[in-house]
Image (cartoon, rainbow, N blue to C red):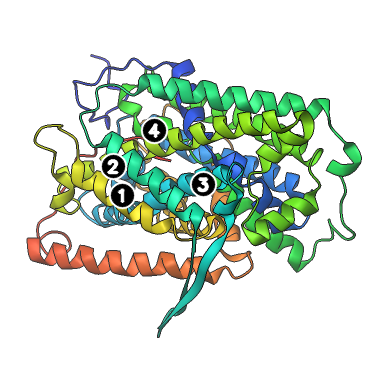
Amino acid sequence: MEPDPHPHDTSSPDLIRGIGLGSATALNMIDMIGIGPFITIPLIVSAVGGPQAMLGWILGALFAMCDGLVWAELGAAMPGSGGSYRFLNEIYGPKTLGRLISFLFIWQLSFSAPMSIASGCIGLSQYAAYFWPRLDHVYAAHKLSLGLSVLGTLELNWLVSAGTFVAIAGCLIAIFLLYRRITSIGALSKLMWLVVVGTMAWIILSGLAHFNRARAFDFPPGTLHLSRPFFRGMGSSMLYAAYLYWGYYNVCFFGGEVKEPGKTIPRALLLSILLVACLYIVMNISVLGVIPWRELDQAAKSNRGMYTISLFMQRIYGPWAGYSVTVLLMFAAFSSVFSLMLGYSRVPYAAALDGNYFRVFGRVHPEGRFPHISLLWLGLVATAFCFFSLADVIAALVVIRITLQFLVQAIGVIVLRVRRPEMPRPFRMWLYPLPALLASAGFVFVLFSRTNSMKQIRYALVLLLTGLVLYFARALYNREWPFGRAVAPVAHGAPTR
Protein backbone atom coordinates (compact mmCIF):
# COMPACT_ATOMS: atom_id res chain seq x y z
CA MET A 1 0.00 0.00 0.00
CA GLU A 2 1.37 3.44 -0.92
CA PRO A 3 1.77 5.94 1.91
CA ASP A 4 -0.67 8.85 2.06
CA PRO A 5 1.08 11.85 0.48
CA HIS A 6 -0.98 14.19 2.66
CA PRO A 7 -1.26 12.57 6.10
CA HIS A 8 -2.23 15.88 7.67
CA ASP A 9 -5.13 16.44 5.31
CA THR A 10 -8.16 16.07 7.57
CA SER A 11 -10.58 17.74 5.19
CA SER A 12 -14.15 16.61 5.17
CA PRO A 13 -14.63 13.65 2.81
CA ASP A 14 -17.67 15.53 1.49
CA LEU A 15 -15.40 18.10 -0.16
CA ILE A 16 -14.63 17.56 -3.83
CA ARG A 17 -11.16 18.30 -5.14
CA GLY A 18 -12.38 19.97 -8.31
CA ILE A 19 -10.40 23.24 -8.49
CA GLY A 20 -7.54 23.17 -10.97
CA LEU A 21 -4.62 25.52 -11.51
CA GLY A 22 -6.52 27.95 -13.75
CA SER A 23 -9.47 28.31 -11.38
CA ALA A 24 -7.25 28.54 -8.29
CA THR A 25 -5.15 31.29 -9.87
CA ALA A 26 -8.25 33.22 -10.97
CA LEU A 27 -9.81 32.96 -7.49
CA ASN A 28 -6.56 34.23 -5.97
CA MET A 29 -6.47 37.17 -8.35
CA ILE A 30 -10.11 38.05 -7.67
CA ASP A 31 -9.28 38.20 -3.99
CA MET A 32 -6.16 40.32 -4.61
CA ILE A 33 -7.74 42.85 -6.96
CA GLY A 34 -10.63 44.70 -5.38
CA ILE A 35 -10.96 48.45 -4.92
CA GLY A 36 -7.47 48.57 -3.32
CA PRO A 37 -5.29 49.47 -6.32
CA PHE A 38 -7.66 52.26 -7.30
CA ILE A 39 -7.75 54.01 -3.91
CA THR A 40 -4.17 53.67 -2.67
CA ILE A 41 -2.26 55.34 -5.51
CA PRO A 42 -2.33 58.79 -3.82
CA LEU A 43 -1.45 57.24 -0.44
CA ILE A 44 1.65 55.48 -1.78
CA VAL A 45 2.82 58.53 -3.76
CA SER A 46 2.34 60.75 -0.70
CA ALA A 47 4.16 58.28 1.57
CA VAL A 48 7.38 58.53 -0.48
CA GLY A 49 6.91 62.07 -1.80
CA GLY A 50 7.26 61.47 -5.50
CA PRO A 51 7.14 59.07 -8.44
CA GLN A 52 9.72 56.86 -6.71
CA ALA A 53 6.55 55.26 -5.38
CA MET A 54 7.05 52.80 -8.25
CA LEU A 55 9.95 51.37 -6.21
CA GLY A 56 7.48 50.66 -3.41
CA TRP A 57 5.26 48.67 -5.79
CA ILE A 58 8.23 46.63 -7.01
CA LEU A 59 9.55 45.97 -3.49
CA GLY A 60 6.00 45.07 -2.43
CA ALA A 61 5.87 42.44 -5.17
CA LEU A 62 9.22 40.93 -4.08
CA PHE A 63 8.05 41.00 -0.49
CA ALA A 64 4.80 39.22 -1.47
CA MET A 65 6.80 36.60 -3.40
CA CYS A 66 8.95 35.80 -0.32
CA ASP A 67 5.89 35.44 1.89
CA GLY A 68 4.13 33.53 -0.89
CA LEU A 69 6.83 30.87 -0.66
CA VAL A 70 6.01 30.51 3.06
CA TRP A 71 2.34 29.95 2.24
CA ALA A 72 3.26 27.64 -0.66
CA GLU A 73 5.23 25.24 1.54
CA LEU A 74 2.62 25.22 4.31
CA GLY A 75 -0.33 24.99 1.91
CA ALA A 76 1.18 22.05 0.01
CA ALA A 77 2.08 20.23 3.24
CA MET A 78 -1.35 20.80 4.85
CA PRO A 79 -3.76 20.98 1.90
CA GLY A 80 -7.01 20.99 3.85
CA SER A 81 -9.31 23.97 4.38
CA GLY A 82 -8.55 26.60 7.00
CA GLY A 83 -5.34 28.37 5.95
CA SER A 84 -3.59 30.17 8.82
CA TYR A 85 -6.00 28.78 11.40
CA ARG A 86 -4.90 25.28 10.43
CA PHE A 87 -1.20 26.10 9.94
CA LEU A 88 -0.73 27.83 13.29
CA ASN A 89 -2.37 24.94 15.12
CA GLU A 90 -0.03 22.42 13.53
CA ILE A 91 3.15 24.51 13.75
CA TYR A 92 2.93 25.36 17.43
CA GLY A 93 1.13 22.22 18.63
CA PRO A 94 -2.63 21.67 18.28
CA LYS A 95 -2.96 20.47 21.87
CA THR A 96 -0.90 23.25 23.45
CA LEU A 97 0.50 26.58 22.23
CA GLY A 98 -1.06 26.21 18.79
CA ARG A 99 -4.51 26.40 20.36
CA LEU A 100 -3.66 29.77 21.93
CA ILE A 101 -2.06 31.19 18.77
CA SER A 102 -4.93 30.07 16.55
CA PHE A 103 -7.36 31.70 19.01
CA LEU A 104 -5.38 34.95 18.78
CA PHE A 105 -5.55 34.68 14.98
CA ILE A 106 -9.35 34.50 15.07
CA TRP A 107 -9.49 37.24 17.73
CA GLN A 108 -7.53 39.71 15.60
CA LEU A 109 -9.54 38.69 12.54
CA SER A 110 -12.72 39.73 14.36
CA PHE A 111 -11.38 43.30 14.12
CA SER A 112 -9.03 43.31 11.13
CA ALA A 113 -11.69 41.72 8.90
CA PRO A 114 -14.15 44.60 9.57
CA MET A 115 -11.30 47.02 8.82
CA SER A 116 -10.77 45.33 5.46
CA ILE A 117 -14.51 45.55 4.75
CA ALA A 118 -14.60 49.19 5.87
CA SER A 119 -11.69 50.08 3.56
CA GLY A 120 -13.80 48.90 0.62
CA CYS A 121 -16.81 50.90 1.81
CA ILE A 122 -14.70 54.05 2.31
CA GLY A 123 -13.23 53.55 -1.16
CA LEU A 124 -16.74 53.29 -2.59
CA SER A 125 -17.77 56.54 -0.87
CA GLN A 126 -14.67 58.36 -2.14
CA TYR A 127 -15.44 57.42 -5.72
CA ALA A 128 -19.07 58.42 -5.18
CA ALA A 129 -17.71 61.89 -4.36
CA TYR A 130 -16.76 62.21 -8.03
CA PHE A 131 -20.50 62.43 -8.74
CA TRP A 132 -21.33 64.44 -5.61
CA PRO A 133 -18.30 66.49 -4.44
CA ARG A 134 -20.16 67.48 -1.26
CA LEU A 135 -19.50 63.97 0.02
CA ASP A 136 -15.92 65.10 0.64
CA HIS A 137 -17.03 67.81 3.06
CA VAL A 138 -15.93 67.03 6.64
CA TYR A 139 -18.46 68.06 9.29
CA ALA A 140 -16.43 67.03 12.32
CA ALA A 141 -12.99 65.60 13.07
CA HIS A 142 -11.65 64.75 16.52
CA LYS A 143 -8.70 63.00 18.14
CA LEU A 144 -9.32 60.80 21.15
CA SER A 145 -6.37 59.99 23.40
CA LEU A 146 -6.25 57.27 26.03
CA GLY A 147 -3.19 57.04 28.26
CA LEU A 148 -2.01 53.49 28.90
CA SER A 149 0.62 53.16 31.60
CA VAL A 150 2.67 50.48 29.83
CA LEU A 151 1.93 51.02 26.14
CA GLY A 152 1.83 54.80 26.05
CA THR A 153 -0.94 56.92 24.54
CA LEU A 154 -3.52 55.23 22.34
CA GLU A 155 -4.80 57.70 19.73
CA LEU A 156 -7.99 57.42 17.70
CA ASN A 157 -8.70 59.95 14.95
CA TRP A 158 -12.24 59.95 13.69
CA LEU A 159 -14.12 62.11 11.25
CA VAL A 160 -17.66 62.58 10.02
CA SER A 161 -18.41 63.56 6.46
CA ALA A 162 -21.31 63.01 4.11
CA GLY A 163 -19.21 60.26 2.54
CA THR A 164 -19.08 58.49 5.92
CA PHE A 165 -22.79 57.80 5.67
CA VAL A 166 -22.41 56.48 2.12
CA ALA A 167 -19.75 54.08 3.41
CA ILE A 168 -22.02 52.97 6.27
CA ALA A 169 -24.88 52.49 3.82
CA GLY A 170 -22.64 50.20 1.75
CA CYS A 171 -21.98 48.06 4.83
CA LEU A 172 -25.65 47.87 5.78
CA ILE A 173 -26.77 46.98 2.26
CA ALA A 174 -24.19 44.17 2.13
CA ILE A 175 -25.47 42.85 5.49
CA PHE A 176 -29.04 42.99 4.18
CA LEU A 177 -28.19 41.10 1.00
CA LEU A 178 -26.22 38.45 2.91
CA TYR A 179 -28.79 38.02 5.68
CA ARG A 180 -30.54 35.20 3.87
CA ARG A 181 -29.89 31.76 2.47
CA ILE A 182 -27.03 31.99 -0.01
CA THR A 183 -27.27 29.36 -2.72
CA SER A 184 -24.79 30.71 -5.22
CA ILE A 185 -22.51 33.73 -5.56
CA GLY A 186 -20.48 32.37 -8.44
CA ALA A 187 -22.13 34.64 -10.99
CA LEU A 188 -21.37 37.75 -8.91
CA SER A 189 -17.72 36.73 -8.47
CA LYS A 190 -17.30 36.18 -12.21
CA LEU A 191 -19.00 39.48 -13.00
CA MET A 192 -16.75 41.27 -10.52
CA TRP A 193 -13.69 39.67 -12.10
CA LEU A 194 -14.73 40.79 -15.58
CA VAL A 195 -15.49 44.33 -14.41
CA VAL A 196 -12.25 44.81 -12.47
CA VAL A 197 -9.88 43.21 -14.98
CA GLY A 198 -11.65 44.88 -17.92
CA THR A 199 -11.44 48.25 -16.15
CA MET A 200 -7.74 47.74 -15.40
CA ALA A 201 -7.07 46.87 -19.04
CA TRP A 202 -8.91 50.04 -20.16
CA ILE A 203 -6.90 52.15 -17.69
CA ILE A 204 -3.54 50.63 -18.65
CA LEU A 205 -4.07 50.92 -22.40
CA SER A 206 -5.37 54.49 -22.06
CA GLY A 207 -2.46 55.51 -19.87
CA LEU A 208 0.17 54.00 -22.14
CA ALA A 209 -1.40 55.66 -25.17
CA HIS A 210 -1.19 59.08 -23.46
CA PHE A 211 1.96 58.51 -21.43
CA ASN A 212 4.12 61.54 -20.60
CA ARG A 213 7.58 60.34 -19.65
CA ALA A 214 8.69 63.66 -18.16
CA ARG A 215 5.63 63.77 -15.89
CA ALA A 216 5.95 60.14 -14.80
CA PHE A 217 9.64 60.49 -13.87
CA ASP A 218 9.52 63.97 -12.37
CA PHE A 219 11.68 63.05 -9.37
CA PRO A 220 12.21 65.78 -6.75
CA PRO A 221 15.83 66.62 -5.78
CA GLY A 222 17.50 64.05 -3.52
CA THR A 223 14.80 61.48 -4.15
CA LEU A 224 16.99 58.39 -4.09
CA HIS A 225 19.36 59.54 -1.36
CA LEU A 226 19.48 56.71 1.21
CA SER A 227 18.49 58.85 4.18
CA ARG A 228 16.16 58.27 7.11
CA PRO A 229 13.22 59.99 5.33
CA PHE A 230 13.79 57.72 2.31
CA PHE A 231 13.57 54.55 4.39
CA ARG A 232 10.56 55.86 6.31
CA GLY A 233 8.82 56.59 3.03
CA MET A 234 9.64 53.12 1.72
CA GLY A 235 8.29 51.58 4.93
CA SER A 236 5.00 53.43 4.55
CA SER A 237 4.72 52.63 0.85
CA MET A 238 5.39 48.94 1.51
CA LEU A 239 2.62 48.96 4.11
CA TYR A 240 0.14 50.01 1.43
CA ALA A 241 1.73 47.60 -1.07
CA ALA A 242 1.23 44.75 1.41
CA TYR A 243 -2.46 45.68 1.58
CA LEU A 244 -2.68 45.66 -2.23
CA TYR A 245 -1.04 42.27 -2.75
CA TRP A 246 -2.80 40.42 0.06
CA GLY A 247 -5.02 37.66 -1.21
CA TYR A 248 -2.35 35.55 -2.95
CA TYR A 249 -2.85 32.98 -0.18
CA ASN A 250 -6.58 32.65 -0.81
CA VAL A 251 -6.09 29.16 -2.32
CA CYS A 252 -4.82 27.89 1.07
CA PHE A 253 -8.19 28.56 2.68
CA PHE A 254 -10.03 26.24 0.30
CA GLY A 255 -7.11 23.82 -0.07
CA GLY A 256 -9.40 20.86 0.67
CA GLU A 257 -11.09 21.39 -2.70
CA VAL A 258 -7.98 21.78 -4.88
CA LYS A 259 -6.83 19.13 -7.35
CA GLU A 260 -3.28 17.86 -6.83
CA PRO A 261 -2.74 20.40 -4.02
CA GLY A 262 0.96 19.64 -3.66
CA LYS A 263 1.49 21.12 -7.14
CA THR A 264 -1.51 23.38 -7.66
CA ILE A 265 -1.34 25.43 -4.44
CA PRO A 266 2.29 26.62 -4.86
CA ARG A 267 1.84 27.29 -8.58
CA ALA A 268 -1.40 29.25 -8.08
CA LEU A 269 0.20 31.32 -5.30
CA LEU A 270 3.30 32.32 -7.21
CA LEU A 271 1.58 32.76 -10.59
CA SER A 272 -1.10 35.06 -9.15
CA ILE A 273 1.55 37.24 -7.44
CA LEU A 274 3.50 37.56 -10.69
CA LEU A 275 0.47 38.42 -12.83
CA VAL A 276 -1.03 40.91 -10.38
CA ALA A 277 2.36 42.57 -9.82
CA CYS A 278 2.67 43.19 -13.57
CA LEU A 279 -0.83 44.70 -13.70
CA TYR A 280 -0.26 46.92 -10.65
CA ILE A 281 3.14 48.25 -11.69
CA VAL A 282 2.12 49.06 -15.26
CA MET A 283 -1.19 50.64 -14.18
CA ASN A 284 0.38 52.85 -11.52
CA ILE A 285 3.18 54.05 -13.77
CA SER A 286 0.64 54.86 -16.49
CA VAL A 287 -1.35 56.96 -13.99
CA LEU A 288 1.80 58.89 -13.01
CA GLY A 289 2.31 59.62 -16.70
CA VAL A 290 -1.03 61.46 -16.84
CA ILE A 291 -1.63 62.96 -13.36
CA PRO A 292 1.25 64.93 -11.74
CA TRP A 293 2.44 63.26 -8.54
CA ARG A 294 2.12 66.51 -6.56
CA GLU A 295 -1.60 66.53 -7.26
CA LEU A 296 -1.87 62.97 -5.94
CA ASP A 297 0.14 63.97 -2.89
CA GLN A 298 -2.28 66.80 -2.06
CA ALA A 299 -5.29 64.53 -2.47
CA ALA A 300 -3.83 62.02 0.01
CA LYS A 301 -2.93 64.62 2.62
CA SER A 302 -6.42 66.12 2.64
CA ASN A 303 -8.22 62.76 2.23
CA ARG A 304 -10.27 64.52 -0.46
CA GLY A 305 -10.37 64.05 -4.20
CA MET A 306 -9.17 60.46 -3.84
CA TYR A 307 -11.06 59.35 -6.97
CA THR A 308 -7.79 59.25 -8.88
CA ILE A 309 -8.84 56.94 -11.68
CA SER A 310 -11.96 59.02 -12.40
CA LEU A 311 -9.80 62.12 -12.89
CA PHE A 312 -7.31 60.08 -14.90
CA MET A 313 -9.93 58.92 -17.40
CA GLN A 314 -11.60 62.34 -17.50
CA ARG A 315 -8.34 64.01 -18.55
CA ILE A 316 -7.82 61.52 -21.34
CA TYR A 317 -11.31 61.20 -22.84
CA GLY A 318 -13.53 63.75 -21.12
CA PRO A 319 -16.30 63.66 -18.47
CA TRP A 320 -18.13 60.66 -19.96
CA ALA A 321 -15.11 58.43 -19.31
CA GLY A 322 -14.73 59.73 -15.77
CA TYR A 323 -18.36 58.94 -14.99
CA SER A 324 -18.20 55.55 -16.68
CA VAL A 325 -15.11 54.34 -14.85
CA THR A 326 -16.52 55.64 -11.56
CA VAL A 327 -19.64 53.49 -11.96
CA LEU A 328 -17.48 50.45 -12.75
CA LEU A 329 -15.23 51.00 -9.74
CA MET A 330 -18.15 51.60 -7.36
CA PHE A 331 -19.60 48.29 -8.52
CA ALA A 332 -16.24 46.60 -8.02
CA ALA A 333 -15.93 48.13 -4.53
CA PHE A 334 -19.36 46.91 -3.45
CA SER A 335 -18.79 43.46 -4.94
CA SER A 336 -15.54 43.25 -2.99
CA VAL A 337 -17.27 44.28 0.24
CA PHE A 338 -19.98 41.69 -0.40
CA SER A 339 -17.55 38.83 -1.01
CA LEU A 340 -15.24 39.82 1.88
CA MET A 341 -18.12 39.96 4.33
CA LEU A 342 -19.41 36.60 3.12
CA GLY A 343 -16.04 34.86 3.44
CA TYR A 344 -14.94 36.47 6.70
CA SER A 345 -18.23 35.72 8.45
CA ARG A 346 -17.52 31.98 8.10
CA VAL A 347 -14.14 32.09 9.89
CA PRO A 348 -15.19 32.93 13.49
CA TYR A 349 -18.13 30.58 12.92
CA ALA A 350 -15.81 27.70 11.99
CA ALA A 351 -13.56 28.39 14.99
CA ALA A 352 -16.58 28.44 17.30
CA LEU A 353 -17.63 25.02 15.97
CA ASP A 354 -14.14 23.75 16.85
CA GLY A 355 -14.61 24.97 20.40
CA ASN A 356 -11.78 27.47 19.99
CA TYR A 357 -13.82 30.67 19.91
CA PHE A 358 -16.87 32.13 21.56
CA ARG A 359 -19.88 29.85 21.20
CA VAL A 360 -22.21 32.65 20.15
CA PHE A 361 -20.38 32.89 16.81
CA GLY A 362 -21.35 29.29 16.08
CA ARG A 363 -25.05 30.08 15.95
CA VAL A 364 -26.81 29.51 12.64
CA HIS A 365 -29.97 31.27 11.47
CA PRO A 366 -32.84 28.79 11.95
CA GLU A 367 -34.32 29.36 8.50
CA GLY A 368 -31.56 30.74 6.30
CA ARG A 369 -28.92 28.35 7.69
CA PHE A 370 -26.09 30.90 7.72
CA PRO A 371 -23.89 32.17 10.62
CA HIS A 372 -25.94 35.27 11.36
CA ILE A 373 -24.22 36.32 14.61
CA SER A 374 -20.79 36.25 12.97
CA LEU A 375 -22.16 38.14 9.96
CA LEU A 376 -23.81 40.83 12.08
CA TRP A 377 -20.74 41.29 14.26
CA LEU A 378 -18.37 41.80 11.33
CA GLY A 379 -20.79 44.03 9.46
CA LEU A 380 -21.65 46.29 12.40
CA VAL A 381 -18.03 46.64 13.53
CA ALA A 382 -17.16 47.55 9.93
CA THR A 383 -19.69 50.41 10.07
CA ALA A 384 -17.86 51.77 13.13
CA PHE A 385 -14.54 51.75 11.24
CA CYS A 386 -16.16 53.83 8.48
CA PHE A 387 -15.68 56.85 10.78
CA PHE A 388 -11.90 56.68 10.32
CA SER A 389 -9.81 57.87 7.40
CA LEU A 390 -8.84 55.39 4.71
CA ALA A 391 -5.13 55.74 5.50
CA ASP A 392 -5.69 55.01 9.21
CA VAL A 393 -7.91 51.99 8.51
CA ILE A 394 -5.43 50.43 6.08
CA ALA A 395 -2.44 51.09 8.35
CA ALA A 396 -4.17 49.58 11.40
CA LEU A 397 -5.36 46.59 9.36
CA VAL A 398 -1.91 45.78 7.97
CA VAL A 399 -0.05 46.25 11.27
CA ILE A 400 -2.51 44.07 13.21
CA ARG A 401 -2.36 41.29 10.61
CA ILE A 402 1.43 41.40 10.41
CA THR A 403 1.87 41.31 14.19
CA LEU A 404 -0.67 38.62 15.03
CA GLN A 405 -0.65 36.47 11.88
CA PHE A 406 1.94 36.90 9.16
CA LEU A 407 5.04 37.31 11.30
CA VAL A 408 4.33 34.29 13.53
CA GLN A 409 3.56 32.24 10.39
CA ALA A 410 6.76 33.25 8.56
CA ILE A 411 8.78 32.29 11.61
CA GLY A 412 6.57 29.24 12.04
CA VAL A 413 7.57 27.63 8.73
CA ILE A 414 11.14 27.41 10.10
CA VAL A 415 9.86 26.16 13.46
CA LEU A 416 7.90 23.41 11.70
CA ARG A 417 10.98 22.29 9.73
CA VAL A 418 12.82 21.90 13.04
CA ARG A 419 9.98 20.27 14.97
CA ARG A 420 8.63 18.07 12.18
CA PRO A 421 11.45 17.31 9.73
CA GLU A 422 9.73 14.05 8.74
CA MET A 423 6.51 15.78 7.60
CA PRO A 424 5.92 15.23 3.84
CA ARG A 425 6.45 18.49 1.97
CA PRO A 426 5.39 18.22 -1.70
CA PHE A 427 6.74 21.74 -2.22
CA ARG A 428 9.86 22.96 -0.47
CA MET A 429 10.59 26.65 -0.24
CA TRP A 430 13.21 27.77 -2.77
CA LEU A 431 16.48 28.90 -1.16
CA TYR A 432 15.22 27.89 2.30
CA PRO A 433 15.25 29.60 4.78
CA LEU A 434 16.12 32.86 2.97
CA PRO A 435 12.56 33.76 1.78
CA ALA A 436 11.10 33.19 5.26
CA LEU A 437 13.84 35.32 6.82
CA LEU A 438 13.40 38.07 4.21
CA ALA A 439 9.61 38.01 4.71
CA SER A 440 10.10 38.29 8.50
CA ALA A 441 12.62 41.12 8.05
CA GLY A 442 10.22 42.85 5.66
CA PHE A 443 7.38 42.60 8.18
CA VAL A 444 9.57 44.09 10.91
CA PHE A 445 10.70 46.86 8.52
CA VAL A 446 7.09 47.77 7.70
CA LEU A 447 6.16 47.73 11.38
CA PHE A 448 8.90 50.03 12.67
CA SER A 449 10.32 52.07 9.79
CA ARG A 450 7.30 54.32 9.22
CA THR A 451 6.65 57.79 10.59
CA ASN A 452 4.59 57.56 13.79
CA SER A 453 4.74 53.77 13.55
CA MET A 454 3.89 53.16 17.21
CA LYS A 455 0.35 54.42 16.68
CA GLN A 456 -0.85 51.25 14.94
CA ILE A 457 1.53 48.98 16.85
CA ARG A 458 -0.26 50.00 20.05
CA TYR A 459 -3.55 48.87 18.49
CA ALA A 460 -2.02 45.46 17.80
CA LEU A 461 -0.61 45.21 21.32
CA VAL A 462 -3.98 46.08 22.87
CA LEU A 463 -5.63 43.34 20.79
CA LEU A 464 -2.87 40.91 21.77
CA LEU A 465 -3.20 41.62 25.49
CA THR A 466 -6.99 41.51 25.52
CA GLY A 467 -6.90 38.29 23.47
CA LEU A 468 -4.52 36.70 25.96
CA VAL A 469 -6.72 37.70 28.89
CA LEU A 470 -9.84 36.31 27.20
CA TYR A 471 -8.15 33.06 26.19
CA PHE A 472 -6.69 32.32 29.62
CA ALA A 473 -9.92 33.27 31.41
CA ARG A 474 -11.91 30.93 29.18
CA ALA A 475 -9.29 28.17 29.43
CA LEU A 476 -9.34 28.42 33.22
CA TYR A 477 -13.14 28.27 33.29
CA ASN A 478 -13.28 25.27 30.90
CA ARG A 479 -10.20 23.55 32.39
CA GLU A 480 -8.45 23.56 29.01
CA TRP A 481 -4.76 24.01 28.15
CA PRO A 482 -2.72 25.21 30.01
CA PHE A 483 -4.95 24.68 33.04
CA GLY A 484 -6.28 21.22 32.28
CA ARG A 485 -7.00 18.85 29.46
CA ALA A 486 -5.46 19.46 26.05
CA VAL A 487 -7.89 19.92 23.18
CA ALA A 488 -7.04 19.43 19.53
CA PRO A 489 -9.38 21.47 17.35
CA VAL A 490 -10.37 20.40 13.86
CA ALA A 491 -9.82 23.31 11.55
CA HIS A 492 -12.38 24.52 9.11
CA GLY A 493 -12.15 27.75 7.22
CA ALA A 494 -13.27 30.14 4.55
CA PRO A 495 -11.30 32.24 2.14
CA THR A 496 -10.05 35.45 3.71
CA ARG A 497 -8.07 38.44 2.43
Asked if 337 appears above or below 437 in the picture, the reply is: above
Q: Residue at x 55, y 43 (%)?
A: 128
- Per the image, label 4 sits on a secondary structure element best described as helix
Note whether 405 is above or below 496 in the view shown.
below
The residue to which callout 3 is attached is 125
Residue where numbered disc 4 is placed: 252
Q: Is residue 257 above or below residue 310?
A: above
How many C-alpha atoms fall within 10 Å of the one at disc 2: few (<14), some, or many (≥20)?
Answer: many
Describe residue 74's horizontal placement relative to residue 38 as left or right.
left
User: Which mark's residue is nearer the viewer, 1 or 3?
Assistant: 3
- Measure the alpha-carbon separation of dots 3 and 4: 31 Å
Q: Kindly state the secondary structure of the residue where label 1 is placed.
A: helix
Q: For marks 3 and 4, give the one nearer the viewer.
A: 3
Residue 453 seen in this snapshot: yes
The quadrant in which the C terminus is found is top left
Please provide percent x and percent y for residue 31: 47, 33
Q: CA distance from mark 4 to mark 1?
A: 22 Å
Circles 1 and 2: CB atoms closer than 8 Å: yes
Depth check: 430 or 309 in front?
309
Give whichever of 265, 446 is nearer the camera.
Answer: 446
Residue 378 disc label: 1
Q: Residue type at mark 1?
A: Leu
- Tally the marks: 4
Q: Which residue is mark 2?
A: 345
The residue shown at (50%, 52%) is 163
Q: Earlier in the sequence, mark 1 or mark 3?
A: 3
Question: What is the three-letter code of the residue carrying label 3?
Answer: Ser
